[in-house]
Amino acid sequence: MKALGESLRKYLRGTFEPYFIVSEEGSPNNILQLPITESMISDMCLRGSFNPSKILIYISKELSTTNISLCLQAEPYPFSTDSTLPISGFPRELVSEDNKIQGI
C-alpha cells in the first residue's frame, strides 16, 4: 500500500488529484467522480492505509452493468482519446452479485 501511495503521489500535479470514475453503462448522466486526495495518498505512503468514505452507487436497473475506472492524468494517453484506465474485474452487475451473496 505504501508503494502504491508513492506511485500515486507522482500524479499529483498542480490542482490535479487522481480519481476513480464509477459509471453505469448506457447512462451517461449517472457518473460519480471520487477523488483520491493528497491526504489520502499521504496516509497510504506513511501508514500503509487507504480508507475512502463509503459511497452509494445508484443504478437504473437491477441488471445494469457498473464500470469503475482510474484517472491518473487530465489529458488522454498517447494513441487514445481517453484519460481513464479500467479497473480489473469491471464492468460487473453489482446488484445481481450482491443478491447472490445475500441469498436473494
Image (spheres, rainbow, N blue to C red):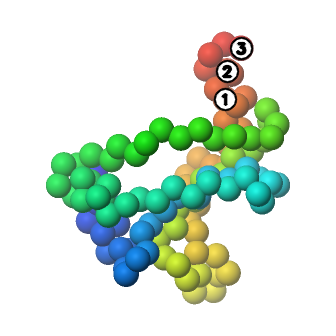
Q: Residues within 10 Å of mark 3 (few under 14, many from 20)?
A: few
The disc labelled 2 sits on which kind of residue?
Lys
- Marking on residue 104: 3
Return the x and y of residue 87 as percentages of the image width and height: 55, 55
Q: What residue sits right under mark 1 in the picture?
A: 97
Residue drawn at (53%, 41%) of the image: 55
Q: Secondary structure at mark 1?
A: helix
Residue drawn at (57%, 58%) of the image: 33
72, above or below 79, in the image:
above
The disc labelled 3 sits on which kind of residue?
Ile
Measured Cα–Cα span from mark 1 to mark 3? 10 Å
What quarter of the picture does the C terminus occupy? top right
Q: Residue furthest bottom?
A: 78
Residue drawn at (55%, 52%) of the image: 88
Q: Residue furthest front?
A: 15
Measured Cα–Cα span from mark 1 to mark 2? 5 Å
- Marking on residue 86: none
Residues at discs 1 and 2 in contact (Cβ within 8 Å):
yes
The reply to whether residue 56 is visible in this rendering is yes
Residues at discs 2 and 3 in contact (Cβ within 8 Å):
yes
Q: Secondary structure at mark 2?
A: helix
13, above or below 68, in the image:
below
Measured Cα–Cα span from mark 2 to mark 3? 6 Å
The disc labelled 1 sits on which kind of residue?
Glu
Does label 1 or label 3 sit earlier along the sequence? 1
Return the x and y of residue 103 as percentages of the image width and height: 66, 13
74, above or below 84, in the image:
below
Q: Residues within 10 Å of mark 1 (few under 14, many from 20)?
A: few
